[in-house]
């Protein structure tokens, strides 16, 4: 898939997730917009996970530990053919499997998340099983930076390093905001790189909205043999919509009709720019 | 009093059974939280090092890692003291195991007041109540070596989560050689029609001994081992209530939310009423001592149970 196609997908995914959040009158808007480029690159360029091989354990694994950004995951899974996109019209509706956090009832989701601080331990288990069975697939998880205050993450970080799980890749959606405000004001996580290093992980930074940089860093894992890898993806919460960016009140705010129209207009303009800038 | 034949600690039987099974089935994996010694699993680690994962003193991680291994097709036993496993890791049990439906076998060692002398931090008197309130998990409290062995064999093949809790004291045999163990199917150990003892775990021994004491007073007792507390064998509870004059439930757990309240709710909703007593640990600052000393404090020894039965019968 070309850079232009992937970039177009990022913008279209943003339009879709905002539309479905509006339709459901619920959702995690800012976080979904901050991680959508990461999910785009993972599912369209990196992961060996398809609707065809999903029931086969001999494939890559992706666990979304920051489960609240489920709308980003759902629009990508729908685009990859895991389920009809029209299913998302039932998002958060009474009786729907498309609930406000990932569940295995939805094709393409392999672990139920939503309570924070759970995904990494689960991934350690998956990565250990891969090693035990001498399989070569990788296990990826997406963590929120606010989520890192959960102590269970640090238990899992220790175990991953202890077992030298170089098939495990954690990506931090480092948007620096959480529901209350700036993460540095709520409970500072800095210096993150040094903390991960001290826990025995190999660390790289990336612009979490740069498709090519994300592709390159994700293609270079593991960064070191016998060490788990962590990618600190510098992102902007609400990325792509001017009035949502870097505004913590949009953590789970639903756009009004007028806000949705404006957001779609901004994203359409961005789409035109992508088309103009790429001829491939 | 008649004597029951001595057995091993259920903990020991768990370990021996698991090693035997794991030698034949390489997909069996044990995850421990610096608990291999407490779980009698040092020989497992020596004989089958590739089938043991150690996460250190980190029970939340223990359960999360176990869920990941189970999702990848391993038959995973997450082994830790019941007190920590079902409190520290409760959210992991709820979400990563039960809600996500990964068939982890959670093994709560030294449950109830097995660690009686170590104080409240090490007692697990909440575990059955907590896990009964979580969807998609079976709860088993084996009474003796037979039930322990059978429950571990059963757990290996279970496709959904299960919690098994037992103690560390050598326990007497309560079953005849022809006993049959099935998930959710209570076992009638002794027949009688005056008093019904409905018991689970290591209080079954005390109930059976109480029945022997009461026999000497001309009182006949039915003793039922309800090894599976969830799903409860409601049919056996109702049938027993219809047959006997009084019912006493016995459990090594707080009197709230455990076997006794489960039976009471079942009987009430079936429209069945009889003199009924829930014997367990009262809601108070827990007494310290050995398991049997604490049993005595809370009326859970054979002598105290037979006294309770006589008092209840006297009021009919």
Image (cartoon, rainbow, N blue to C red):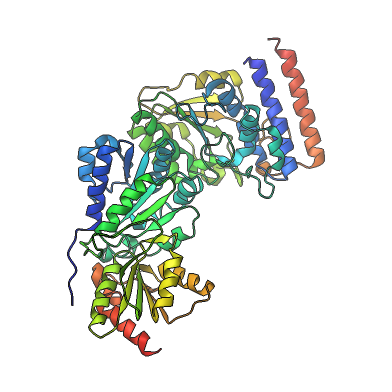
The percent coordinates of residue A141 (x first, y second) are: 50, 33
The percent coordinates of residue A163 (x first, y second) are: 33, 33
Q: Which residue lies at the image location 49% right of the left edge and 77% below the top edge?
A: B272
Judge from the rendering whether residue B183 lies leftward or rightward of residue B39; answer left or right. right
> Residue B307: which quarter of the image?
bottom left
Q: Which residue lies at the image location 61% right of the left edge and 47% below the top edge?
A: A180
Judge from the rendering whether residue A161 lies leftward or rightward of residue A17; answer left or right. left
Q: Nearer the viewer, residue A198 or A33?
A: A33
Split into 4 quadrants, where in the image is the C terminus of chain A?
top right
Q: Which residue lies at the image location 39% right of the left edge and 22% below the top edge?
A: A224
Judge from the rendering whether residue B124 lies leftward or rightward of residue A1; answer left or right. left
Judge from the rendering whether residue A219 lies leftward or rightward of residue B65; answer left or right. right
Q: Which residue lies at the image location 63% right of the left edge and 45% below the top edge?
A: A99
The percent coordinates of residue A200 (x first, y second) are: 37, 31
The percent coordinates of residue A125 (x first, y second) are: 40, 37
From what the image shows, is residue B158 above or below residue B51?
below
Q: Is residue B281 visible?
A: no
Split into 4 quadrants, where in the image is the N terminus of chain A?
top right
Outermost residue, front side: B178
Q: Nearer the viewer, residue A171 or B102?
A: B102
Outermost residue, top side: A280
Q: Nearer the viewer, residue B25 or A87?
A: B25
From what the image shows, is residue B11 above or below residue A185?
below
From what the image shows, is residue B41 above or below residue B7?
above
> Residue B247: which quarter of the image?
bottom left
Q: Is residue B264 visible?
A: yes
How many numbered discs sit on the rendered protein?
0
From what the image shows, is residue A173 above or below residue A90?
above
């Amino acid at each position: 898939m070309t850079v232009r196609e992937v970039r177009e997908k990022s913008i279209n995914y943003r339009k879709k997730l905002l539309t479905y959040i509006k339709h459901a009158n619920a959702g995690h808007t800012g976080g979904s917009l901050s991680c959508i480029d990461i999910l785009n690159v993972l599912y369209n360029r990196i992961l060996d996970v398809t609707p065809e091989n999903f029931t086969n354990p001999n494939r890559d694994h992706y666990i979304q530990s920051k489960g609240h950004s489920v709308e980003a995951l759902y629009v990508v899974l729908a685009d990859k053919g895991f389920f009809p996109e029209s299913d998302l019209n039932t998002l958060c509706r009474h009786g729907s499997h498309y609930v406000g956090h990932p569940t295995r009832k939805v094709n393409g989701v392999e672990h139920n998340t939503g309570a924070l601080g759970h995904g990494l331990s689960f991934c350690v288990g998956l990565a250990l099983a891969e090693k035990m069975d001498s399989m070569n697939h990788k296990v990826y998880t997406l963590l929120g930076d606010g989520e890192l205050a959960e102590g269970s993450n640090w238990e899992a970080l220790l175990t991953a390093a202890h077992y030298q799980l170089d098939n495990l890749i954690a990506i931090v959606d480092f948007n620096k905001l959480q529901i209350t405000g700036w993460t540095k004001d709520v409970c500072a996580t800095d210096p993150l790189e040094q903390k991960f290093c001290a826990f025995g992980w190999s660390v790289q930074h990336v612009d979490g909205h740069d498709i090519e940089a994300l592709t390159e860093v994700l293609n270079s894992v593991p960064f070191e043999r016998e060490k788990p890898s962590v990618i600190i993806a510098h992102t902007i919460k609400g990325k792509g919509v001017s009035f949502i960016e870097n505004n913590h009140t949009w953590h789970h705010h639903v756009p009004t009709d007028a806000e949705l129209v404006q957001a779609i207009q901004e994203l359409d303009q961005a789409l035109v720019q992508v088309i103009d800038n790429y001829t491939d | 009093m008649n004597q029951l034949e001595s057995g091993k600690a259920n903990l020991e039987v768990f370990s021996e059974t698991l090693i035997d099974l794991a030698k034949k089935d390489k997909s069996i994996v044990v995850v421990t939280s610096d608990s291999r010694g407490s779980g009698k699993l040092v020989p497992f680690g020596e004989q089958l090092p590739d089938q043991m994962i150690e996460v250190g003193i980190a029970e939340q991680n223990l359960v999360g890692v176990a869920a990941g291994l189970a999702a990848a097709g391993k038959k995973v036993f997450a082994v830790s003291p019941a007190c920590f496993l079902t409190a520290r890791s409760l959210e992991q049990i709820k979400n990563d195991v039960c809600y996500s439906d990964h068939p982890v076998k959670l093994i709560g060692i030294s449950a109830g007041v097995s660690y009686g002398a170590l104080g409240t931090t090490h007692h697990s008197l909440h575990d059955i109540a907590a896990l009964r309130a979580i969807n998609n998990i079976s709860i088993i409290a084996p009474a003796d070596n037979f039930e322990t062995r059978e429950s571990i064999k059963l757990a290996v093949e279970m496709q959904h989560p299960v919690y098994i809790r037992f103690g560390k004291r050598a326990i007497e045999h309560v079953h005849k050689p022809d006993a049959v163990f099935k998930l959710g199917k209570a076992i009638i150990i002794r027949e009688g029609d005056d008093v019904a003892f409905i018991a689970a775990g290591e209080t079954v021994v005390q109930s059976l001994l109480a029945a022997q004491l009461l026999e000497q007073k001309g009182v006949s007792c039915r003793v039922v081992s309800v090894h599976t507390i969830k799903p409860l064998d409601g049919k056996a509870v109702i049938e027993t209530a219809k047959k006997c004059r009084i019912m006493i439930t016995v459990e090594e757990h707080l009197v709230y939310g455990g076997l006794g309240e489960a039976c009471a709710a079942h009987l009430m909703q079936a429209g069945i009423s009889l003199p009924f007593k829930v014997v367990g640990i009262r809601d108070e600052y827990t007494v310290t001592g050995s398991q049997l000393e604490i049993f005595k404090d809370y009326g859970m020894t054979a002598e105290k149970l037979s006294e309770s039965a006589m008092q209840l019968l006297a009021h009919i």
